[in-house]
Image (cartoon, grey):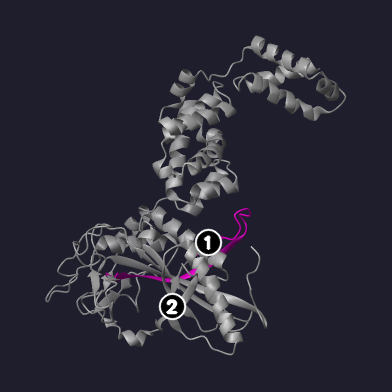
Amino acid sequence: MSEYRIQGATGEWEVVIGLEVHAQVTSNAKLFSGAATAFGAEPNTQVSLVDAAMPGMLPVPNMECIRQAVRTGMAINAQINKWSRFDRKNYFYADLPQGYQISQLYHPIVGEGSIEIQLDDKNPESTKTIGIERIHVEQDAGKLMHDQHPTMSYVDLNRSGVALMEIVSRPDMRSPAEAGAYLSKLRTILRYVGSCDGNMDQGSMRADVNVSVRRPGEPYGTRTETKNVNSVRFVMAVVEQEAKRQVALIEDGGAVVQETRLYDPDRNETRSMRSKEDAHDYRYFPDPDLLPLELDDAFLEECRASLPELPDAKRHRYETALGLSAYNAGVLTADVETARWFEALLAETAAKAKKPEAEVAKQAANWLISELFGALNKLGKGLDNSPVSPAAGAELLALIADGTISGSIAKQVLEKMLESGDGAAAIVEREGLKQTSDTGAIEAAIDGILAANADKVDQYKAGKEALFGFFVGQTMKAMAGKANPGVVNELLKKKLA
């Protein structure tokens, strides 16, 4: 990835980026109440007396939310603070009935960590480490909806009180691509851990994008914060557009104001929302209703033991133990559901072939990435709604491996599997697609092709060996793709010799 610079009228500018990612914790209940957290429920049907801030209602921490935050911290090799504390962040707005948000400013549950991102998909050595400053746990706010009528607004408190992890990066990113790679990698890790579903379109993961510009090598400039950006593509667009806006503003004699902005994807531009508040504006103080969180060693050990194999470790294992290319290993580990699907396919394929997984891994990986992904993409589907299961894929691979069908016929069989949901063996039997090794039939086809192309036979014998592929192709065409390629090659070599 080449160095990213904004070219202004007076020279080059460097962009400095930090992300504050809000990730909704995967749990059945909210952070301080027993109310449900399911997405898409009828408005205001998942609101407890605590969420509604009824007098006398006291918050009680949901330890599953705490556990998920700790596990996330461990997954990014961060410091876990055995002692942490909740603070009140005071602001008065209709989406938070109690008039304050319970958060962690001074003593977060997770301290410094880092994430390694890949800068170039084709070069696995091209990496960069992005520092993470902290992860703290806090309540989400409700949702306000403004009617077209100028005097009417509505509030849905279903989301109010839902547990969030705020994951704050260092200002270590220097391009839209780096910001996108960081957010994608973080989302992948959260999904592997199971601490957040990462569904940005549903708002369960969103990013506040901090952007400033400076001349290369100079101190940081004044930053702006663009709130609640809900896709990787939009985060990259915010970085690019906001950096260009700031450069144009400075070069025109103006100054960047520290403020909160919003992104308009329809116009692909950011616009001012409000001046940026500092910590003292919120009058933080320790929450008097909550004792500090004190975590013991047994709890931390249980959290660590519950972690799955994480994406970097899995990718390394795929390369070293299974012999996959760096590219294929990266594709298969980029999403936890893809990795699970591949591993199920691999186990089934190895069992059918009665071979170690390492011996069939390349075949399984190549088929999944090259064939199934491509076919599903044409249908507008993903692995999550694929008509072909890992077991069905393994059945098809077994038919290729034992010579029942050729690779070209396998493509036709896959299409029919996706259309009908039937198994590969049943389709091959029904459609009469079995590969033939009948040397008599293949020889007859070859003789006819050589007789019809005597001029090319002479050219081949004169040294134009590239024509061998032509003869193979013509033979396979004559045999409707059902001839065994190994037998075709062997017989052609004899005939042409």
Q: Is residue 486 visible?
A: no
In the image, residue 281 lies at what x, y percent?
A: 34, 87
Q: In the visual, does 32 lie left or right of 194?
A: left
Residue at 22% across / 74% down in the picture? 290
Image x and y of residue 362, in percent: 57, 37
- Along the viewing direction, whichever of 473 and 97 lies nearer the viewer: 473
Q: Main secondary structure of the magenta part?
A: strand
Magenta segment range? 115-143
Q: Residue at x 88, y 24 (%)?
A: 462
SS for dot 2: strand
Kindly identify which residue carries mark 1. 181
Residue at the left extreme?
A: 56
As measured in the structure, the alpha-carbon distance from the residue carrying label 1 to the one carrying label 2 is 22 Å
Find residue 226 and report its image quarter: bottom left
Q: Position of residue 395 (x, y in %)?
A: 46, 28
Say if mark 1 contacts mark 2, CB within 8 Å: no
Q: Is 128 contained in the magenta span?
A: yes
Identify the residue at image location x=45%, y=53%: 310
Q: Which quadrant, please, contains the C terminus?
A: top right
Q: Quadrant of residue 457?
A: top right
Q: List the residue tagged with mark 2.
A: 261
Element type where label 1 sits in the image: helix
